[in-house]
């Protein structure tokens, strides 16, 4: 290990000021970072504490005592803001008062410097007893290191603690595994989190320490390749995080990632996250392999003595054939004795497919043997290789573990070189649960459950694996992905027609959900555009399944029964067009009895009236479950007047109602209509809304606030500004840099109206501000289609001029620019 020299003033190098000054100099020296700085800081702290302890012990007259570093300090790994874990160990002969005085002379200088301290005073017997009762204490003592005092006391404790650990391994290791699993469930997986906890999350520093403890038990050992480097990288990131924030934190928050990346000399925050994810993936995979081996050894220890007693001899492990060259042994997939991986290029895929289909892990030895001699497949791939890949992708959840094993040893990148570009690539949109590569595998897993719905499950699974390969390339990832998918599909061995279908699925994998949620499905232009893009019924069938699999693999916010119903509706309409039917121009729907009642009441009273009604969705009825609500239908009838749209949107935002769709039209008044509303006409608004949380507000409260909003007595902007200030103070949002809003006119969006699309950061009252801007632009809104994914809102508005016709191109562009300015940003 690189040595680090630290100079202090001779006159006070043992005092707090001398230590503090030397510590500060060490932390400020950019040339000393990483392991040298951590070990240098530990040695500097050792020297200071040694001097403190030696002087204090002499003054207190205490002998047979030692100062012992445990935990991270015991390993000699002090990060800039790490706490000090110290044990004052004594042989039990000193008086309590003298021990207390000694402890105070050591603890108080540490506290005076503002350092966090975890301390205890124990005899070796007490330390062993506490370790036997508390697993975390036992883990800390495994890294015990002598700092000052009686070396024999420390050495005796270390020997005893290690012996206890090895003797108790069959009991303690299952406890440790359970502790790791509980922590992972609580803190998540480090390799996928946008704001990861470098210590507590699965694949973090705690897991690396747990692997050291397993190795100390002599029961099993972790795969060593890359493990130390991964651990060092996480420690380096934590060091930079401590120096950047000045705090003892392990959470890599969004607002600090750019600074941490710069401190480490990395290009940007994405590069930082990729390195963190790579390290976490190495530790996670090593943990999986190690705990599997621990369980195997413990299981064998409990079973073999009984077998020996029954059979009187040692039995060879049973080997069950799974595929050519592949067998199952002791719960793992291994290579057959006759396998020749150096001559069988398809064997890695065959072994992986057999493992996934059997729901078994591939043994570490087998994967490494395959990786050591594997050679690239011929291009195009032989049919067997292509079929084994499809079998692997179609195995469901079992695919994930097998894929990760192959990826850990570089086999996936060898088979699919383009994989390297998406590997560990972060996705900044919080809607996404996974990194790009894991999302692709997860999409294939989701697609495997939908293969009975399509005629070509092989094309669905391959498209699922490839659909986001364009991420990381400049421009639209769907456009870049189409080119990559076409090349990979051809190399895998699909014929020209199938390559074209796969490429089209990748190019349009967002088409259905974006169209269904942001466009008017009653507009013939909408349905015709999708039909022209898809081109064939078989492709539409595959695209429908891919859309669902992709959304389910993205995260909970990306798919719902509401989105599913809209996509299904769109698919039915497109299928009819592809079958030869022409989409008919929509005719104004006759008002329902409820709409008619509300319209009559509105023009009689001259004020708004409304009703709320849940809309059930049929999913789940077949399984005997309660239908899930598609949303709540909010019907509003109001005399036509300026400001209706922003007023309604503002009131709904105040009551924390999320708008999904909104339709506005003039109500047809009967000839006999007579009332305040008859002079201006009546607007009928048909909206779908959902409560952000909690229950829906009462219709009477909504109406009362809407009356006040329309007559100007309710200050909606002020109320929404208060909510927005609270929203911006959310710790999860502090420091987040949102891109500027963007407003565009959708080309050829509709023959009936101009489609204006708004992409902006979601915030309370966004629809209210948009409504005000559209009112100021003197356009009429026929319908609005609201889509929110995480922090991003993508809303489409169908607008016309006063006469009800689409806007001329120049006017549409002017409206878009005005709307962009109103949302707080002027296009360059």
Image (tube, rainbow, N blue to C red):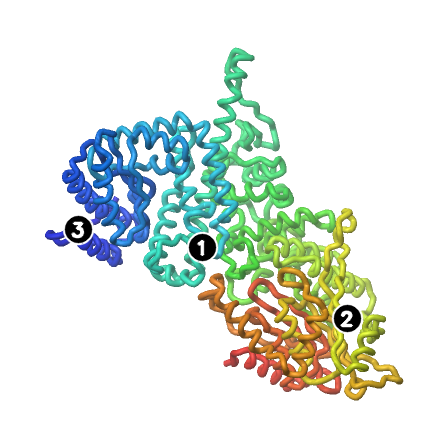
Q: Residue furthest right?
A: 672
Question: In the picture shown, does residue 177 fall above or below 717?
Answer: above
Q: Position of residue 152 (x, y in %)?
A: 22, 30
> Any mark on residue 96, and which?
none
Mark nearer the N terminus (2 vs 1): 1
Does residue 633 appear in this view? yes
- The residue lying toward the viewer, choosing from 272 and 170, is 170
Does 312 sit left or right of 569 as displayed? left
Q: Residues within 10 Å of mark 1 (few under 14, many from 20)?
A: some
Nearer the camera: disc 1 or disc 3: 3
Mark nearer the N terminus (1 vs 3): 3
Q: Quadrant of residue 318?
A: top right
What SS does tag 1 mark? helix
The residue where tag 1 is placed is: 274
What SS does tag 3 mark? loop
The residue where tag 3 is placed is: 15
Does residue 75 appear in this view? no
Q: Position of residue 297 (x, y in %)?
A: 48, 27
Q: Residues within 10 Å of mark 3 (few under 14, many from 20)?
A: some
CB within 8 Å, label 2 to label 3: no
- The residue lying toward the viewer, choosing from 94 and 55, is 94
**Residues at marks 1 and 3, CA–CA distance in whole angstroms:** 42 Å
- The residue lying toward the viewer, choosing from 565 and 73, is 73
Q: Position of residue 520 (x, y in %)?
A: 72, 71
The residue depicted at 52 percent of the width and 59 percent of the height is 427
The residue where tag 2 is placed is: 522
- The residue lying toward the viewer, choosing from 654 and 731, is 654
The residue depicted at 73 percent of the width and 73 percent of the height is 663
């Amino acid at each position: 290990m690189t040595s680090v020299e630290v100079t202090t003033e001779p006159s006070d190098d043992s005092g707090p000021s001398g230590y503090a000054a030397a510590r500060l100099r060490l932390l400020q020296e950019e040339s000393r970072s990483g392991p040298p700085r951590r070990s240098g800081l530990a040695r500097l702290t050792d020297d200071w504490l040694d001097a403190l302890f030696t002087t204090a012990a002499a003054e207190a007259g205490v002998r047979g005592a030692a100062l012992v570093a445990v935990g991270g300090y015991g390993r000699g790994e002090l990060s800039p803001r790490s706490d000090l874990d110290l044990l004052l160990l004594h042989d039990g002969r000193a008086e309590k008062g003298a021990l207390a005085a000694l402890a105070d002379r050591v603890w108080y200088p540490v506290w005076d410097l503002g350092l966090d301290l975890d301390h205890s005073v124990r005899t070796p017997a007490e330390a062993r007893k506490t370790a036997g009762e508390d697993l975390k204490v036992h883990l800390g003592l495994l890294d015990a290191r002598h700092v000052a005092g009686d070396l024999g006391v420390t050495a005796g404790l270390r020997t005893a603690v290690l012996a206890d650990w090895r003797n108790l391994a069959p009991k303690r290791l299952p406890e440790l595994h359970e502790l790791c699993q509980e922590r992972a469930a609580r803190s998540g997986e480090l390799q996928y989190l946008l704001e990861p906890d470098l210590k507590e999350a699965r694949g973090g520093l705690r897991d690396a320490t747990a692997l050291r403890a397993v190795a100390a038990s002599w029961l099993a050992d972790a795969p060593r390749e890359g493990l130390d480097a991964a651990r060092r990288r996480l420690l380096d990131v934590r060091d930079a995080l401590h120096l950047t924030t000045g705090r003892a934190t392990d959470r890599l928050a969004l607002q600090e990632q750019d600074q941490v990346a710069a401190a480490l000399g990395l290009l940007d925050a994405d590069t930082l996250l990729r390195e963190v994810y790579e390290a976490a993936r190495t530790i996670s995979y090593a943990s999986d392999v190690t705990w599997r081996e621990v369980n195997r050894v413990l299981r064998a220890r409990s079973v073999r003595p009984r077998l020996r007693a029954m059979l009187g001899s040692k039995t060879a492990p049973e080997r069950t054939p799974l595929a050519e060259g592949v067998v199952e042994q002791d719960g793992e997939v291994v290579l057959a004795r006759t396998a020749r991986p150096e001559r069988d290029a398809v064997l890695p895929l065959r072994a992986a497919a057999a493992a996934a289909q059997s729901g078994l892990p591939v043994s570490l030895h087998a994967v490494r043997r395959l990786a050591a001699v594997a050679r690239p497949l011929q291009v195009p791939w032989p049919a067997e290789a292509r079929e084994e890949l499809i079998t692997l992708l179609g195995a469901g959840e079992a695919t994930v573990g097998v894929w990760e094993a192959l990826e850990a040893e570089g086999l996936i990148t060898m088979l699919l070189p383009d994989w390297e570009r998406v590997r560990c690539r972060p996705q900044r949109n919080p809607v996404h649960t996974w990194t790009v590569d894991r999302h692709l595998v997860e999409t294939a897993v989701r697609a495997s459950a939908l293969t009975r719905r399509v005629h070509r499950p092989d094309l669905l699974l391959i498209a699922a694996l490839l659909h986001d390969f364009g991420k990381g390339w400049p421009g639209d990832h769907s456009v870049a992905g189409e080119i990559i998918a076409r090349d990979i599909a051809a190399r895998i061995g699909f014929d020209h027609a199938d390559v074209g279908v796969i490429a089209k699925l990748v190019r349009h994998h967002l088409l259905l959900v974006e169209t269904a949620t942001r466009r008017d499905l009653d507009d013939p232009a909408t349905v015709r555009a999708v039909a022209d893009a898809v081109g064939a019924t078989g492709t539409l069938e595959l695209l429908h399944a891919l859309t669902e699999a992709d959304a389910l693999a993205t995260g909970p916010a990306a798919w719902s029964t509401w989105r599913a119903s809209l996509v299904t509706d769109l698919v039915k309409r497109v299928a009819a067009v592809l079958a030869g039917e022409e989409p008919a121009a929509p005719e104004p729907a006759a008002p329902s009895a409820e709409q008619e009642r509300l319209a009559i009441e509105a023009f009689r009273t001259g004020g708004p009236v409304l009703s709320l009604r849940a809309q059930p969705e049929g999913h789940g009825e077949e399984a005997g479950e309660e239908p899930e609500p598609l949303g709540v239908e909010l019907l509003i009838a109001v005399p036509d007047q300026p400001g209706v749209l922003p007023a309604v949107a503002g009131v709904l935002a105040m009551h924390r109602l999320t708008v999904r769709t909104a339709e506005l039209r003039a109500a047809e008044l009967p000839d006999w209509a007579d009332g305040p509303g008859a002079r201006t006409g009546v607007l009928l608004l048909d909206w779908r809304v959902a409560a952000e949380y909690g229950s829906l507000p009462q219709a009477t409260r909504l109406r009362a606030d809407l009356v006040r909003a329309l007559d100007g007595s309710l200050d909606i902007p002020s109320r929404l500004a208060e909510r927005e200030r609270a929203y911006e103070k959310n710790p999860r949002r502090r420091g987040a840099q949102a891109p500027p809003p963007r407003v565009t006119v959708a080309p050829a969006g509709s023959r009936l109206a101009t489609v204006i699309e708004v992409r902006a950061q979601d915030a309370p009252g966004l629809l209210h501000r948009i409504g005000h801007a559209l009112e100021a632009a003197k356009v009429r809104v026929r319908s609005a289609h609201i889509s929110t994914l995480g922090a991003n809102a993508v809303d489409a508005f169908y607008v016309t001029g006063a006469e009800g016709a689409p806007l001329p191109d120049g006017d549409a562009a002017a409206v878009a620019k005005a709307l962009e300015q109103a949302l707080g940003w002027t296009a360059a």
